Amino acid sequence: MKRKYTIWIYAVILLTLVNACKKEDQPVQPTQPIDTSPKVKIPVVSTSALSNVSPFDATCGGNVIKDGGSAVTSRGLCWSGDSFPTIADSKTIEGNGLGKFTSQVTGLHNNSLYYVRAYATNKIGTAYGNQMVLTTVDTNYLYIGQTYKGGIIFYLDGTRKHGMDVAPYDQGIFKWSAADSVCKALVWNGYDDWFLPSSNELNLMYENLYLRNIGNFKSTIYWSSSKSGSQPGTASGQLFGPSIHVMNYPDQDTYSVRAVRRF
């Protein structure tokens, strides 16, 4: 009896060892690696305020704040007569990447309602900014960029009945000391009350006309009537270019002159 019991014990031990060897022979299954890479999302973009609204166009823009982890390949504005426009509607393309941009909403009808949003696209998809509501100007009222009373309107007061015109062409290139006299001597379309704009007025011409490609301006420096008090022998001028650049220039230098008038 004792011998049978001993044989049974040995059999159990042998079977256990055989099963253990089989388990050791089985290949170890690799575990799946944990993905720690950041998840790519659509960009984050905001829509800027509307400005320079006319019967047929307006200025707007946006700011691409985040790219979502993937390069922004396209950005701009989209608009429609229906709310929440998409890139399937009318749109502009203003380059790529992060940052602010400005664009023109065009092809509009006077005294009409539109909706405008900025957009930004990466490899995941397209994101949209907040929606702006645009009502174009009634052509029964004056508007920025309109040809009126001898020039082109670049400023209107709250009544939209009074403002300022700029002559449609440069009066030439002169030293600062001669610039105002040249403007006062101008007679254009029957008007003879022209003068050299101040620094602030010159900047309104830049923002409201030049940046919208209105007014036949050159990409050059224009004189203002503002004289520098801190730097003798200099006067204020502005470079009309991609960005605002106002500074004092030697008043013996020669720069472009554009006359304005009030109405």
Image (cartoon, rainbow, N blue to C red):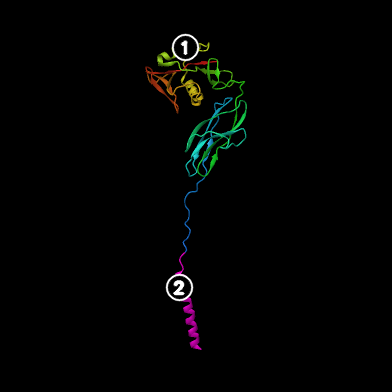
Q: Kindly tell me whether residue 179 is visible in this rendering.
A: yes
Give the residue number, with chain letter if any, for mark 1: 184
Residue under label 2, please give it. 21
Residue 176, percent from left and from top: 41, 16
Q: Is mark 2 on a helix, strand or loop?
A: helix
Specify whether residue 14 is painted magenta: yes
Q: Residue 68 carries which label?
A: none
Instruction: Residue 24: say if magenta.
Output: yes
Q: Nearer the viewer, residue 247 or 26?
A: 26
- Which picture quadrant has residue 143? top right
* Cβ atoms under marks 1 and 2 closer than 8 Å: no
Q: Which amino acid does label 2 sit on?
A: Cys
Q: Which residue: 47% across, 70% down?
A: 23
- Provide the residue span drawn in magenta: 1-28
Q: What element carries label 1?
A: helix
Vertical comparison of 101 with 34: above or below: above
Residue 118 location in percent, x, y? 54, 35
User: Which of marks 2 and 1 precedes in the sequence?
Assistant: 2
